Amino acid sequence: MDGIVGMGMVAIVAVVLLYGLHRAVSVLAQPLTVLPAQSGWIPQEHALSRYHVRWYLASIVFLAFDVEMLFMYPWAIVVAEKGISAVIEMFLFLGALLVAVAWAWREGAFRWV
């Protein structure tokens, strides 16, 4: 039990020392130099502002095609030894992606206006 209490005390002292060191050496941010790329332009919106839902749909479509490529590279290597079943499975997978793209198209993920 003494070891656990000792480790807890060491951890608390380490956190307090690190926090004090951070406060001692930190530099105050100057408003004109912390703007994006020090351009001098005043930001028009908050950095954590909300994105339109179409960006989420576009990113999901991108991830779907990115994962498709992850599956197609090894598939291209083993398709000769696996035979027609590998071809059928890949076309089923591509069909599922086509359904996802059709859904995203219907939802307006590709309209940028």
Image (cartoon, rainbow, N blue to C red):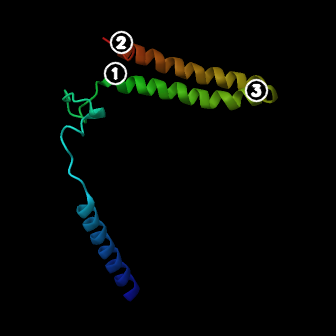
Q: Is residue 90 left or right of residue 28?
A: right
Label 2 element class: loop
Query: Is the residue under label 2 in contact with that under label 3 (CB below 8 Å)?
Result: no
Q: Which label sits on residue 79?
A: 3
Label 1 element class: helix
Which quadrant of the view contains residue 18? Answer: bottom left
Query: Is the residue under label 2 in contact with that under label 1 (CB below 8 Å)?
Result: yes
Which quadrant of the view contains residue 109? Answer: top left
Q: Label 2, on which residue? A: 111
Q: Label 1, on which residue? A: 54
Label 3 element class: helix
The residue at the far bottom in this view is 2
Could you tell me the amino acid type at mark 1?
Arg
Question: How far across and down, in percent of the image, does residue 49 sit?
Answer: 23, 32
Measured in 3D between alpha carbons, the distance from the residue under mark 3 to the one under mark 1, in whole angstroms, is 36 Å
The residue at the far right in this view is 81
Q: Residue 35, relative to residue 68: is it above or below?
A: below
Q: Going 28% across and 66% down the picture, which residue do you hit? A: 21
